[in-house]
Amino acid sequence: MARWLLPLVLLALLPAPASAASLAGTKWRVVSVHGHAVPRSAGEHLDFTARRISGHDGCNGFRGRYRATVTRLRFRDIVSTAIGCDGGPPSISGPLVSTRRYRLSGARLELLGRRGRTLAVLRQR
């Protein structure tokens, strides 16, 4: 029995995997969309609460719901203001709809598509 105790203790010391709980209460600045840099001045951001998101895509504000597990992430029921904007940096709006998974590493959040391709990179603010 004693030989099983050490592995159990070591397992308990491992950090918990990322989950919806680890996203709740966090705020992120959009750094890149589809590999294209988004300047800080664009003001694009994404904020998570317990089950909801809100943010700004550089032109319009948006809000919606999300569901996350250890590796999966889906955004739903996204509503947005409808201000018409010409040009500007790449928008986070498209990647939100296409996100299927995510990777959380310290202050970096990657939104991933169906095949694991990085759709957007965000930095915690």
Image (tube, grey):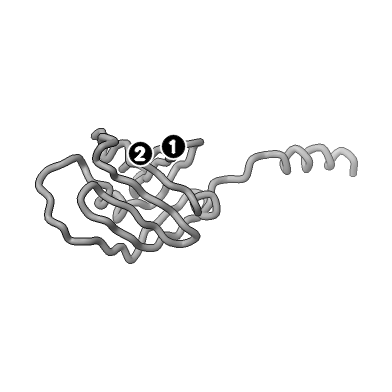
Give the left or right position of residue 63, taking residue 91 as reference: right
Q: What is the C-alpha distance between the residues marked 2 and 1?
A: 7 Å
Counting from the top left corner in percent of width and height, residue 102 is at 42, 46
Q: Quadrant of residue 40?
A: top left
Quarter of the picture holding the C terminus? top left
Callout 2: SS: strand
Q: Earlier in the sequence, mark 2 or mark 1?
A: 1
Circle 2 residue: 121
Name the foreground residue: 110 vs 84.
84
Mark 2 burial class by Cα count in 10 Å: few <14, some 14-19, many 20+? many
Q: CB atoms at circles 2 and 1 under 8 Å apart?
A: yes
> Which residue is pictured at 15% across the width and 41% down the height?
88
Mark 1 burial class by Cα count in 10 Å: few <14, some 14-19, many 20+? some
Residue farthest along the bottom direction in this orientation: 77
Counting from the top left corner in percent of width and height, residue 42 is at 24, 41
Counting from the top left corner in percent of width and height, residue 98 is at 30, 53
Callout 1: SS: strand
Give the left or right position of residue 47, taking residue 92 as reference: right
Amino acid type of the residue tagged 2 in the rendering = Val
Q: Quadrant of residue 75?
A: bottom left
Name the foreground residue: 20 vs 40.
40
> Which residue is pictured at 36% across the width and 56% down the height?
54
Amino acid type of the residue tagged 1 in the rendering = Arg
Circle 1 residue: 108
Counting from the top left corner in percent of width and height, residue 41 is at 25, 37
In the rendered view, would you say 78 is above or below 88?
Answer: below
